[in-house]
Image: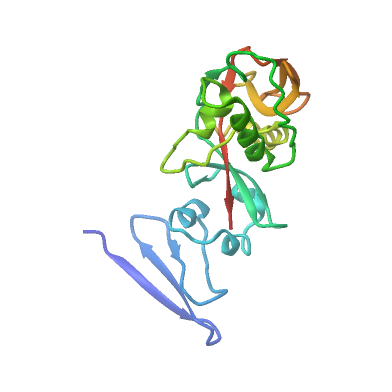
Amino acid sequence: MKRSIILYLSICSVGFIVFSCSKEEEPIPIPINEPNNIVLVNIQDSLNNNVPITDLLTQFPVDSLFGKTYQGGLIFYITTFNNFGLIVAPYDQGYKPWENPLNWTPTGANLSYPGGGQMNTTTIVNILGAGDYAAYLCDTLTINGYSDWYLPNTNEFKSMFDNLFIKNIGNFTDGTIYWTSLEYNNGNAYVSNIGTGHGQSSKGKDSHKHVRAARIFNF
C-alpha cells in the first residue's frame, strides 16, 4: 500500500496549507476551506475536484483554463466582466443542413457576441420547429449529463480557433467547415472554417456542414 505523508504549515494564524506528498507521485496540493488560502498547481485536478473558477482565477491567468475539461466539454472562453464562460463539446455532433427542408424561412438569428449563439439557437428552433438540422441537433443534445447545448455563432468559433485549435486542442481537423447559428439571409447562413478562425462566408441553408455544439457556464 502506498504511504502518504501529510505536512501542515501555519501561515500567520490565518489558516493551514495542506500538502499531500507521496514517494510515487508528484505532490498534489489539497485545497483548504479557509478563505484566500487555496494553494493549487494542477488546474485540471482542481476543476475535477470542484474548486470554484473564481478561486482559480486569483492564482492563474484566464488563458491557463482554456482547453481544460469542465462540465461536459472544453473551456474556450472566459470573461470576468459578468463571470461566465463557454465550453465546446469534445467532438463533432454530425453533418447536417442549417434548415431542412429549405423553405427560405427568415429566423432573425443575428447575435454575434460571445454567448449569443444560445439565443440564436433558441430563436431558430422556435421558428423552424423539430427537424433534422444543425441547431435542433445541438438544442436536443445531451453530453456527460448536460443538455443545454447550442449552435455557436461566428465569434464563438473564432474563440475556439484562438484558444483551442492553434494549440491542437479540441479534436478539430484543419479545413473543416462548421455551421454557425448566425443567419445571413433567408436562404443562407454563415459558416466557419476552423482552420482560419476568421473570414467566415455564407452557404446555402440546405447544404450539409459539420456541427459542433457549445454551452454557457456561470461562475
Q: What is the total number of numbered labels drawn onto the structure image? A: 0
Residue drawn 41% across and 41% down? Answer: 144
Res 133 quadrant in image: top right
Residue drawn 56% across and 86% down? Answer: 12
Answer with left or right where residue 149 lies relative to residue 174.
left
Residue 37: x and y in percent read 54, 74
Residue 139 shows in this picture: yes
Closest to the observer, 185 or 176? 185
Looking at the image, is 157 positioned above or below residue 145?
above
Residue 97: x and y in percent read 59, 17
Answer with left or right where residue 114 lies relative to residue 129.
right
Residue drawn 63% across and 39% down? Answer: 118
Answer with left or right where residue 144 lies relative to residue 134.
left
**Quadrant where the C terminus lies?**
bottom right
Looking at the image, is 83 positioned above or below residue 188?
below
Residue 171 shows in this picture: no
Residue at far left of view: 1
Residue 159: x and y in percent read 69, 37
Closest to the observer, 123 or 142? 123
Closest to the observer, 145 or 48? 145
Residue drawn 54% across and 76% down? Answer: 35
Answer with left or right where residue 195 lies relative to residue 90.
right
Coloured how? rainbow
Looking at the image, is 85 positioned above or below residue 128?
below
Residue at far bottom of view: 13
Residue 10: x and y in percent read 48, 83
**Quadrant where the N terminus lies?**
bottom left
